Image (cartoon, rainbow, N blue to C red):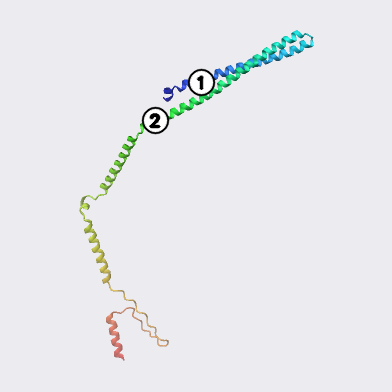
Amino acid sequence: MFNRLFGKPKQETNALTTLEKLNETLEMLEKKEKVLLKKASTEVERAKEYSKAKNKRAAIQCLKRKRLYEQQIEQLGNFQLRIHDQMILLEGAKATTETVDALRTGAAAMKAMQKATNIDDVDKTMDEINEQTENMKQIQEALSTPIGAAADFDEDELEAELEELEGAELEEQLLQPATTAPAAPVVAPAGRQQNHPVPQKRTAEEDELAALQAEMAL
């Protein structure tokens, strides 16, 4: 789309066509130069032969033709130099044009992207996201709210009942009698050990009776 708008293909085709034409012309001039160099060299050899044959006039004519060939060769060299300069300038202009086209294309793409995502659309999108988030929070709170009979329970009453249960349990633990530690076995002195079994556990009444019997025995 951008290429059709800015005409880049046509410009690129023209540049490539011109470069190809200049390159063909340069190759033609180089070939012609080689031919003229060969002809100039031939005239020099012929002048030598005529000089050996004492034909001075013919030798001079050969040297004149050689000079003409050399002038053409110099002219062809100037033509080639001009073509080289033109090709360098054209290649530089082509690179500049391509760079400008690339920058123009990038700027157009950036403009299109900014047009597609302007600040108003961004703000609107963020508002929608915030609204959806708030709605979701409300839905989650509604789902977590007790319904039916559970919704009628008073949290304060439940906490008071729990405190009563904990107080009753603590009071029950305090009223339980302490566990009586088992009496330590009485060890008789050596030589006076008794064979009577030691009772493992006695009640308070049994302890009083045993103490009374001991007094009577005295």
Asked where in the image residue 160 lies, by quadrant, the reply is bottom left
Indicate left or right for 108 with 45 as reference.
left
Q: Could you say which is closer to the camera, residue 70 or residue 213?
A: 70
Position above or below: 180 against 138:
below
The residue lying at 53 percent from left, 25 percent from top is 92
- Residue extending furthest bottom? 218
Q: Is the residue marked by circle 2 packed among few (<14), some (14-19), or many (20+) residues within 10 Å?
A: few
Whole-percent x, y for residue 102 in the image: 46, 28
Task: Check the picture and name the quadrant holding the C terminus.
Answer: bottom left
- Disc number for residue 111: 2
Task: Check the picture and name the quadrant holding the N terminus.
Answer: top left
Indicate left or right for 214 with 77 as reference.
left
Position above or below: 64 against 127:
above
The residue lying at 27 percent from left, 67 percent from top is 170
Indicate left or right for 55 with 133 as reference.
right
The residue lying at 41 percent from left, 31 percent from top is 110
Specify the amino acid type for callout 1: Ala
Whole-percent x, y for residue 131 in the image: 29, 41
Contact, mark 2 vs mark 1 (Cβ under 8 Å): no
Determine which residue is flagged by label 1. 15
